[in-house]
Image: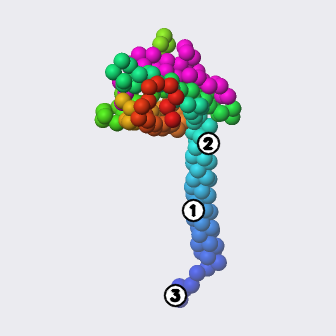
Amino acid sequence: MRKNSAFSGLEGAIVLIAFVVVASVFSYVVLGAGFFAADKSQTSVHEGVKTAQASVYQEGGIYGTLDVNGQLDKLMFTIYIAESSLEQDLEGMTISYTQSDINNPREYTWGATGPSGTEFYSGGMSILYPGKNVKIELDQVQGPKSGGWFAIEIRPKRGSTLFIKRWLGSGYDGGLII
């Protein structure tokens, strides 16, 4: 008997088919991962656009009143969202107030009936619609005297945070804060 150690045509065909099957499964996995990554990046872009569209902006100036001790007592300012934006739920919004002579911030949440030491007032409005604005009132801020600063951080339920910082000029006695 002779020893035949060569491949036959049938064995070569089986090996070739096995390589083609393995290569096709590998390419399917690679394409699937590529489509998955593209879908995730598209989702990230859409979420970024939604966040940018839900941003809150300040309109006009900030007005303040002083108490009998010369401390900032009440703040009023207007916020709005652009025409092409998404509506904002004011009930889910938080406003953080900080000042130059106090380290820990004071948190304000939405109040339906009026401003207080823990609630901001938006004229009873609970939803801010695109293209509209609302006057926000903070009460009992116990703010700085003339020469001090304060900062307001508005954190909507969705969208980016708005940060406002102002200094009270020397001789400030109420009204517009520049």
Whichever of callouts 2 and 1 sits on the residue coming sooner in the sequence is: 1
Q: How is the image coloured?
A: rainbow
Disc 3 residue type? Lys
Mark 1 Cα shell of 10 Å, populated few (<14), some (14-19), many (≥20) = few
Q: Which residue bears the numbered disc 3?
A: 3
Tell me which numbered mark, 2 or 3, is placed earlier along the sequence: 3
> As drawn, which residue projects farthest toward the front?
171
For label 3, the SS is loop
The residue under the point 53% across, 33% down is 158
Q: Are marks 1 and 3 in contact (CB under 8 Å)?
A: no
- Say which residue appears at 58% left-offset and 60% top-offset: 30
Q: Residues within 10 Å of mark 2 (few under 14, many from 20)?
A: few
- Measured as percent of width and height from the top left, residue 59 is found at 59, 31
Q: Is residue 96 left or right of residue 10?
A: left
The magenta-colored residue range is 115-144
The secondary structure type at the circle numbered 2 is helix
Q: Badge 3, how many Cα within 10 Å: few under 14, some, many 20+?
A: few
- Above or below for 37 versus 69: below
In what element is the residue under mark 1? helix
Residue pointed to by mark 2: 49
Residue carrying label 1: 26
Whole-number angstrom distance, CA of label 2 to CA of label 3: 72 Å
- The earlier-in-sequence mark between 1 and 3 is 3
